[in-house]
Image: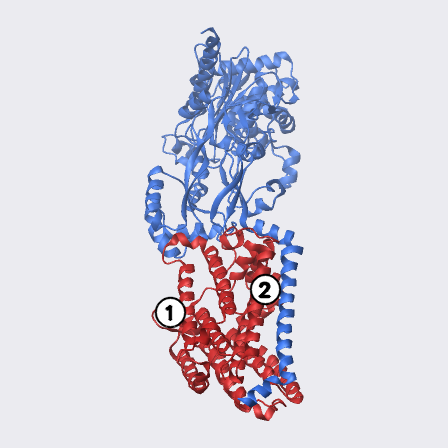
Amino acid sequence: MGLDQNWKKLQVVQQRFFFYSMAATVIFFLLLLRLWYLQVISYQNLHDRSVRNRTRILSFDAPRGPIFDRNGVLLVGNRPSFQISVMRQDVEDRTLLFEKLAPLLNLEIPELERRWKKGKRFAIYRPTPLAMDVSREVMEKVQEHGVDLPGVLTEVRPVRDYLDHGSAAHLIGYLGEITKAELQNKKYAHYRGGDFVGKTAIERTYESYLHGEKGQRLVEVDVQGKLLRQLQVEPARPGNKIYLTLDRELQRAADEVFAGETGAAVALDVRTGEVLAMVSRPTFNPALFAKGISGGEWRELALDNRHPLQNKVISGQYPPGSTFKMVVALAALRDGVINTKRKINCRGDFLIGGSRYRCWKKRGHGETDFKKALRESCDVWFYTVGLELGIDKLSKAARELGLGAPTGYPLPGERSGLMPSQEWKHQRYNKPWYAGETVIASIGQGFVLATPIQLAVMTAAIANRGKVLKPRVIKKIEDWDGNLLLQPETEVVRQVHYSPETWKAVQDGMVAVVNEPHGTGHAAHLDNVLVAGKTGTSQVVRRKTDKEEELDKDGKIPYRFRPHALFVAYAPAAQPEIAVAVVVEHGQSGGRAAGPIAKRIIQRYMELKKQKQQEPKE
Amino acid sequence: MFDRRLVSNFDWVLFLTVLLIAGIGITNLYSATYSDHVSGGTPLYLKQLLWLAGGVLLAQLICLFDYRHLEHFAIHIYGLSLVLLIYVLLIGRTTMGATRWIHLGFFNLQPGEVIKIAMILLLAKIFAETTTPFGYSLSELWQPALLLLLPVLLILKEPDLGTAMMVIFISMTMLLFAGLKRSTLVGLMVLAGLVGVAGWFGLHDYQRARIRTFLNPEADPLGSGYHIIQSKIAVGSGGFFGKGFIQGTQSQLAFLPERHTDFAFSVFAEEWGFAGSLVILLLYLFLIVWSLYVARRAADKFGLFLAVGVAAMLFWHIVVNLGMVIGLLPVVGVPLPLFSYGGTSMVTTMIGVGLLMNVSMRRFMF
């Protein structure tokens, strides 16, 4: 014991107590310095970081701009939809969750997996959509099972609502999730993965007007990204209102009369170039796209060989057949190859260079003058005149009237058709032009191809005596305060010049087609309005021998070999307002298949006009 | 047997300081686990309160008998601790890749903690018997070195670098106090350097990652750097006066990991700011300096070394934990005594406190 005390009382040992206490004090002082550095000197920086840690800016979709017809009738709006989403980080056992969810959502587990994987592109605090636009029943079922489904939530999201069952779907277009390529495009700078954008037609071209501005919510989140409370909200600004030139009532009539046929029909305002109705068949249901189309549904549409997604009005290229004959007639009159008096004898066929070209009427039309040639669509008359005129003059006249080049339709996807010339053939095939090719070009066959919109523009130009108009689809675009954002004006692409007599002769011929005995377009005749029109029946496959053709006679031609039926018309003949072009694929006869469709559209137009005139009196 | 003088010599300063720190610690735990309260079950702060009560009881029990009896049992306690360490390696509970616990039904015993006390007792006994005014030479140290190496290797095997380090630090602190010849001191420092280099290669990947992360936490802010970054944000964003009780966004919104255990102080610093941190640090410093004061007043060398050992244990835990939490030291799993949640840490600390009080109240008994 005593030794203990001696050791303890050694100076060196006593110093150790002091030294240890000092060392501890110094080290604590260093800790305090560090705390001072963090809490006082770096305070602002670290405080900001803690704020950033806990707050997130969440954006929510703006309702897309509504689309109206020319009279302000809503065509495409928005409705709230229920969306089942999942916060991925809240899910511990995904397999178990999907096993429970799949029957509730009526989805296969692999499909859920696919959507889950897609969500990995999103920020962690953003819910991943598993099922869009589910029914109220499904939503309620999911909510009932909420306790068993950790991380699953229901959201309400605006979704496109197509009021007329997707009528005019090809004009309006459809939506789809933004692609990776689009996200890299400057045009979509403010978009994020998972956003829906217009993929075609109006929805695509006017995306910037329709999209609106997303709303933003400043929220507080915990480390898992779980939303705790909302700190601030900035409401979404809905997209602007688009008024189309389309008339919904006319569109409905066109839809109804076109029924189950394949092909296209378009009605233009002769004075302005406005598209009044637009039908392309078969069609598709844009609502499928609005909620995120499934792989199977997409394949079905994309692989259909009748191309439901294609707008045949602007991208369907058809031999115009006899609807082309007005061009030949106009050009020949201007050139002086013929006058309205000259008669040509049609014996049912035409011989040149050892080849024989037949008139559609086997017995022949006999002595045929200008008017009769148009009225009864005498092929031999046009073979003769066309050959005398030559392909290049014919081509020039056709191009003037809007064929062989895009009309300037404002939405993407328009094709240019084809108006051949000697030079074209030399460049394309490095071969000379043959007289026989001029012969068949004179009846709109051979190389000649036109889209329905081109035929409508051409018909309108004939109706308004030479004004080739650019088709228009937008009447105006307005914001929600009523400010006009866009109002396209009538654009005359060019004025074609023919003498008044020439115009009259051709127009009279078209009136005769519909209204005179032996006229091929009698099916389009209306009692209360004078319709001018022209039929066309264009062969799909060229048949070489008479024998084959005879086989065809009894209606047993396979569908794909049947000729396309065409009809172009305008009305009223005296003061034209509407021009219509109709193509019924494999419709056999222009007069019988396409004529009634044109007739119904014109009839409905006149009815609506009358209604409108009466309305203000009420 | 019970002497009046013992009561009058009871070290109220030490006892109340400990209670004060523990009280603040439990209040802090209430806040750190506030968001968990809704989930039901016994709240952690209540459990910790029970541990504290148990710990106080244990400390008082330890005061009942003369600490000098422990000198005779030091070797037995040490032996038992080694057995526990071996046992835990054989059939312990494994969590997060490490085997550290023996499941005892009501709580999980960590032999790594027990060995700290055992080591302090054993070294205090050895040093009490063998110190000379001239200090130790290297050749005299083979026995304590071996006794230290055995448990350290076993702990490293678990693996539990933090505890192994603590045992070494405590032992070295006691040894330095016992005194070394100058040549021995230099030799030991060289040895420590060599062990450090060799140790780097013996480290587990996660341990090496922690050290690298410590050197540059921003390199991997969501991975291994996450703890340090979030803790620094928590501490720093507290500012001078803090965000207020249960108002710390870093802790309440769970950005801060392990906020009721190793990072409990971050919660406190966030909510009470520099002012609060200063108070806590001064309390801890006072506790350590007072412990050294207890050592200085001890009646014998054994008591002296016991007190130095406990002071060292408190000091190293506090410094390493705080250093980690404020980004001065790498992340090693060392709890903050009286602050971090955990029964073992509380019991170990309170045993240490009990030993201190025992030494302190028997300072006049020769």
Q: Sort mark 2 into few (<14), some (14-19) or many (20+) by Cα contacts within 10 Å.
A: some
- Quadrant of res B289: bottom right
Tell me the crowding category of disc 1: few under 14, some 14 to 19, or many 20 or more residues within 10 angstroms, Cα based.
few
Q: Is residue B267 visible?
A: yes
Identify residue for label 1.
B107
Query: Residue A42 placed where, x, y %?
Result: 65, 55
Chain to which the residue tagged by mark 2 belongs: B
Viewer-side residue, B197 vs B332? B332
Task: Please tell me the colour of chain B.
Answer: red
Between circles 2 and 1, the one closer to the viewer is: 2
Q: Residue furthest bottom?
A: B139
* Residue B260 location (% of width, % of height): 47, 61
Q: Are marks 2 and 1 on the same chain?
A: yes
What secondary structure is found at the residue carrying circle 1?
loop
Q: Element under label 2? A: helix
Sequence-first tag of 2 and 1: 1
- Identify the chain of the residue marked 1, using the numbered disc in the image: B
> Who's blue, chain-wise?
A
The image shows residue A415 at horizontal and vertical percentages of 57, 34
Residue furthest out toward the front: B4
Is the residue A614 above or below the residue B39 in the image? above
> Is residue A415 visible in the rendered structure shown here?
no
User: Which residue type carries mark 1?
Assistant: Phe
Q: What residue does disc 2 label?
A: B282
User: Where is the C terminus of chain A found, in terms of image quarters?
Assistant: top left
The residue at 59%/64% (across/down) is: B282
Please determine whether, in this image, residue B228 is positioned above or below residue A114.
Answer: below
Calculate the distance from the C-alpha at mark 2 to the C-alpha at mark 1.
Answer: 32 Å
With B292 as the anchor, is A26 left or right in this view?
right
The disc labelled 2 sits on which kind of residue?
Leu
Residue in front for this viewpoint, B45 or A151: B45
Please state which of residues A119 and A452 is positioned toward the viewer in this rendering.
A119
